[in-house]
Image (cartoon, rainbow, N blue to C red):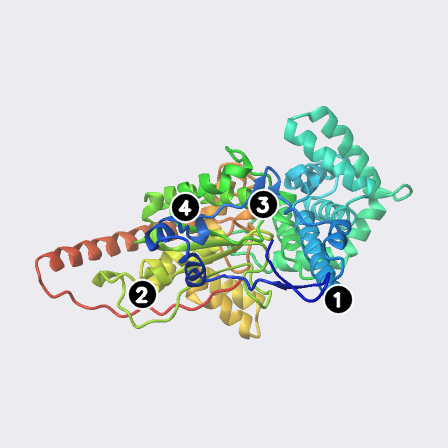
Amino acid sequence: MGWIVREAGTGRYHLTNHAPMNRKSEIVRALRPFFSEEEIEESHVPVHALSQAEVVEGLQTRQIISQTELTKDITGVADKDFDRIVGSVKRAQELQAERARRQQAVLFDGFGRKVFERLTDALVTKARWAEPEASVLAIQGIEDAVRRPNSPVSGMMSELGAALGRGDDTSAETLTDIIIHKMRGEDQEWEGLRETILDSDRFQSISAFFEDNRFANGTLVSFRTAALASAARRAGGVRLHPTIMDRIEVPVPVAEAFTYYRERLPFLVVRDSSVPSALLAQNMAAVDKALDVIANELELPRDQLVPKQSTIPVRFSYDSVLANGTALGFMQRAKTEQSAVADGEDFRDALTINLSVAVGQTFTHELGHLIDHGNGLTDEERHAILARSGVLAAASTAVDKVFPEGGQMAEYYLDEKEIFARAMDAHVVNVALSRGDRELASVGGLHTTQGFDAAAPFGDLAMTSAFITEVKDALAHRREARHEASRKAELGQAVPQTAGVGFATHSM
């Protein structure tokens, strides 16, 4: 059971816990007395291919000895050892309880975005409010239910989510009326509540953010999208979990989803052991949807968006993907002086996408970075794409309005690598909206995009379509250059060298 036991006097024993073996070399060394090198090598399985004991709702709780059993088993152990062993087991039990808590059924039955849309629409029609104040009250009601998961309102919102999932409009209508009544309060009139919402800091901050992020040709997205994005991004307080807001249909049992999507996704998929299976399945299914849309828009097979794509790890982590807790996702490549794609060198193993499944919202943005850097686009090529499509001028105008004094954030939003990634994200959202998909379900919802960002052409399909056309042309030129380089290499001719591409860590 992991303990080395030796006698320490009459009726007494000394227990020592085995040191963990985390490296392959340590495990091989321990197995050598019992198995041949060939048998050991044949039995080795890479970490990303391992599957843990799973059940439908997540990782199966490991069997941990009970306190009663433990006390019987270590009778006679010295007091200090007894306390140490009991403390160790207690900490393990607490860890398992925390993991089990993470795997509880999601609030609102996973249809939170539909709940938000239904409440907003009901406030517009029943209370005759405009969309801005209706959106803010709806999102505040949802946040209050998240803060108090055992409250009557939270329970009714879960019932409303289940009814919307079943397509039960009669029950959904009744529940909506009751929830709005509870949100309004017993004695508060609609107009009085509306004035309170209009005067609230929340409404003012969203209004200012929304008004400051308009292009000359109109509104980026609806106010309700801005309200939803503000809730998803809030620092402190409540930050909406993707599984509260979005339910993605998974075509296989959850326990089989990792294997299923690892085969479908054209990346080297890596799962951190902390990620519950149900949440992982939702995120992988969402990424699968978004990838289809991007590949279709770029008119490329899914596995040809980036050369050597199958060697690029996409790592799914539970929460923040950086130790400092600030990043929800990032694309990374170690800096190198290696040549760019056109000379045939394979440098893409160093590229990595890291995604938080607990918060989501970043896949389409990070895939934009991957398409940019993984194809070796030069600064000149990237600048031409952004300038000719009009994205660069629009972003510059928007940043000047939001950050008139300039500063670090203005520099970040004006970085052309960031503008490129945000334009890619915006186009995916714009395509979904153009199809009437206000919930962004066809592109994976909040699991893959927040649906809104500062200084990016969200809502302007003509501009992002022009951007995509420029990207397609640039990628076609890159493919032709690689083909020519390969042909010359086969003929033994010298291939002209192109400038190296530097890559830096990106964080949301």
Q: Give the quarter of the image for residue 207.
A: bottom right
Number of callouts in the render? 4
Residue at image mark 2: 378
Q: Secondary structure at mark 2?
A: loop
Query: Residue pushed farthest front?
Result: 10
Q: Amino acid at mark 2?
A: Thr
Q: Residue at x 29, y 55 (%)?
A: 474
Residue placed most toward the observer, 119 or 322: 322
Q: Nearer the viewer's eye, disc 3 or disc 4?
A: 3
Q: Position of residue 352 (x, y in %)?
A: 42, 59
What residue is drawn where x is 72% and y is 66%? 81
Label 3, residues with CA under 10 Å away: few <14, some 14-19, many ≥20: many
Distance of label 4 from label 1 (alpha carbons):
64 Å
Q: Quadrant of residue 116?
A: top right
Element class at badge 1: loop
Q: Residue 58, can we see it?
A: yes
Circle 4 or circle 1, nearest the eye: 1
Seen from the viewer's position, the closer of residues 414 and 254 is 254
**Mark 2 to mark 4: distance in Å?**
21 Å
* Amino acid of disc 1: Ala
Q: Which mark is residue 294?
A: 4
Q: Which mark is residue 405?
A: none
Pick whichever of labels 2 and 4 is earlier in the sequence.
4
CB atoms at circles 2 and 4 under 8 Å apart?
A: no
Of callouts 2 and 1, the N-terminal one: 1
Disc marking residue 279 = 3
Q: Residues within 10 Å of mark 4 (few under 14, many from 20)?
A: many
Q: Is residue 413 left or right of residue 334?
A: right
Between the C-alphas of marks 3 and 2, the distance is: 37 Å
Disc 1 designates what residue? Answer: 78
